[in-house]
Amino acid sequence: MSVSASKKFENFSEWFDDVIFRARIVDNRFPVKGFSVYLENGAFMLDVIKKLLEDELEKTGHKKMYFPLVTSEELFRKEAEHIKGFSKEVFVIDQGSGEQKLIIRPTSETIMYPMFKLWIRSHADLPLKVHQSVNVYRRETMATRALYRVREIPWNEAHTVHENAAEAEKQVREAMQIYETVLKKLCIGYIILKRPDFDKFAGAVYSIAFDAWNPDGKVNQVATIHNLGRNFAKAYEIEFEKRDGSRGTPYQTCYGFGFSRVIAAIIAQHGDDRGLVLPPVVAPTQVVIIPILFKGQEKQILDYASKVRDMLAGRWRTVLDDRDDITPGEKFYHWELMGVPVRVEIGPKEVVESSVTLARRDTLERVKASLDELVGKVDELMRAIESNLLERSRRMMLSVISDANNMEEIKKILKERRIARINWCGSIECAEKLKDEVGGEVRGERYDIVEKPFGPCAVCGGEARSVVYVARSY
């Protein structure tokens, strides 16, 4: 029996909403638009992802801090491009009685950088690398969507300050490696794109983003990295004494990792019509033991199942489902919905043979293992599941990308819920025409590899300056 009458690739929205509610990820019925409740499994996943990322950040010298929720309207308006980019999205606290309005952070440049001005005095204070895992708030004007497009966004943001442009550029590369490491552990397939100038982060020199594939053909931006140059440092008057004694303006970077978007990617890329399929690292329950009871042998089977649980519980998050009010089949269905990587089945035959039957959630394959080889076999299965999910998602990312040479081909690819790879002249007019006529956005060009144009601009027919990717997005 499937989770929903619809299939994941046929009616993604219905499938996704059904899974996240029934698998205890998110309850989207909170009576304020764009705000959700993270249920126990969603909260667990969020905490695991947060720890994975924070561990990598702290290994590379980022210091964890917490900054205030609000900034003043005066501070928010200091960087002209930044305020222009976020002016329609911010929530405002109006205190009344003539007091200044407070801006609730949509991101924290305007909150952190006045403090950076106080902390940075000389080159000895650099590089400064800080991060925080907090919620940010954006008054989305588009239709909200649980996990993908929300008004309260749990994320991690890192901000760095450097002596020169070369060090800032090096930091961009380090940030990219950190994000790649975490997304690999979560088995997520994506491409890294440098955004076109008209779509970069407000106030940045340039922006790059990690776009993950989605079953409905839209891309899911799970993380972004921005080289800020000296734009914000100048606006917030951050200066330092250089090694030669002169005064200098530092270079900055910032980068954000969206926890809710990453959870959405895990569910969307790995899940199937039975429910969640979770990579072991993020699964709230990694192993479930299902005793299959026969009349007169209940105690013997349950005692054996308890022994198996004790063998596995120290290594994996293990649950023994010994409920006696539902059938083994109903238990199978429940734990498949929850995405548990490995199921252990124990009946009279397994007790007699001192064995177990193991079922993988990703492929649904079942294998026998003796009690002596149980721990090693489960370890082996976990590694195999992780490897399979990663390879499957990377392969899917490549398979949804197709080359297009003209507007009709772009339209056909997007209609088929895929991503178009095209030659582009670089003009905003052609990008706007794409958006108006085929509903796709120029997401950018590859940042991690060099791709040369293989023909004229697919929109106007003029000389192409770059190869870019066109997709619908959240």
Image (cartoon, rainbow, N blue to C red):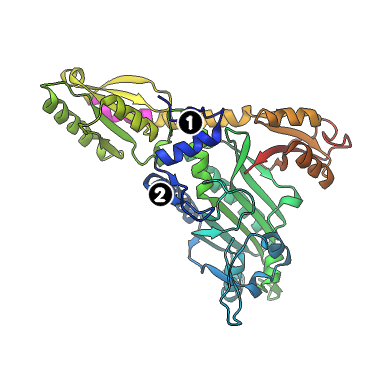
Q: Residues within 10 Å of mark 1 (few under 14, many from 20)?
A: many
Q: Is residue 180 magenta?
A: no
Q: Quadrant of residue 459?
A: top right
Q: Secondary structure at mark 1?
A: helix
Element at label 2: helix
Residue 55 relative to residue 176: left or right? left
**Disc number placed over residue 43 in the picture, else none:** 2
Q: Earlier in the sequence, mark 1 or mark 2?
A: 2
Residue under the point 55% across and 33% down: 12
Name the spot of residue 322 as percent of width and height, x first.
21, 33
Query: In the rendered view, does 264 fall on the left or right side of 323?
Result: right
| Front-most of residues 115 and 403 | 403
Which amino acid, mark 2?
Ala
Q: Nearer the viewer, residue 384 or 401?
A: 401
Neighbor class of circle 2 (other Cα within 10 Å; few <14, some 14-19, many 20+) is some
- Mark 1 belongs to which amino acid? Leu
What residue is at 49 percent from the left and 32 percent from the top?
Answer: 270
Q: Main secondary structure of the magenta part?
A: helix
Label annotation for residue 389: 1
Q: Specify the segment rendered in magenta.
A: 372-382
Position of 369 relative to 13 (above/below)? above
Please state the horizontal and vertical placement of residue 158, each as a whole percent of the image: 55, 58
